[in-house]
Amino acid sequence: MATWGCVKQCGACCHLDPADRPDLDEYLTPDELQLYLSMVGEGGWCVNFDHAARECRIYADRPRFCRVQSDVFEDLYGVEPEELNDFAIECCREQIEGVYGDRSLEMIRFNSEVGF
């Protein structure tokens, strides 16, 4: 069985382009939406993403909507805790494919990490 895990130095989730997420206002509070939009920088990348190191500069203090946790996903998306693993895997695969491509090194690394 595949088990979700974050792959270091991927950063696909840090590509925040609002055009890719037209329904942001359906699951973020107005304050969270304002924060999210303030984090979108050049090319749709999060202003807190360090492109050279390929990691988040504020990881320990990242916003709630950046966290893959059962309580957050249940609140934001209505995902039951027992569904989080499969949901998170699918979300990551879609995001990595959209940002880097389905045959990218990031996708290969992610698939290996989760056991695909």
Image (spheres, grey):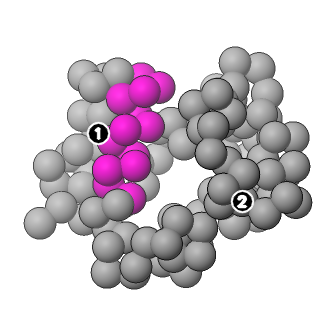
Q: Residue at x 40, y 34 (%)?
A: 96
Q: Count residues near mark 1 (Cα–Cα under 10 Å), then give few for <14, some for 14-19, many for 20+.
A: some
- Of the numbered discs 1 and 2, the one sitting upstream in the chain is 2
37 in relation to 68, above or below: above
Q: Residue at x 40, y 79 (%)?
A: 80
Three-letter residue code for mark 1 = Arg
Q: Nearer the viewer, residue 30 or 105?
A: 30
Residue 106 makes an appearance in the image:
no
Q: Secondary structure at mark 1?
A: helix
Give residue 34's position: percent from left, percent from top.
Answer: 87, 49
Horizontally, residue 92 falls left or right of residue 45, namely left
Report the predominant secondary structure element of the magenta stretch.
helix
Q: Quarter-wise, where is residue 54 in the image?
A: top right
Give residue 40's position: percent from left, percent from top.
Answer: 77, 34
Q: CA distance from mark 1 to mark 2?
A: 30 Å
Give residue 112's position: percent from left, percent from top.
Answer: 20, 46
Horizontally, residue 116 falls left or right of residue 20, namely left
- Identify the residue position indicated by label 1 in the image: 109
Q: Count residues near mark 2 (Cα–Cα under 10 Å), then give few for <14, some for 14-19, many for 20+.
A: some
- Identify the residue position indicated by label 2 in the image: 28
Three-letter residue code for mark 2 = Leu
Q: Which residues are magenta?
A: 88-100
| Residue 91 is inside the magenta segment | yes
Q: Residue at x 24, y 22 (%)?
A: 103
Q: Nearer the viewer, residue 100 or 25?
A: 25
Q: Quarter-wise, where is residue 49 in the image?
A: top right
Q: Nearer the viewer, residue 115 or 29?
A: 29
Q: Which mark is residue 25?
A: none
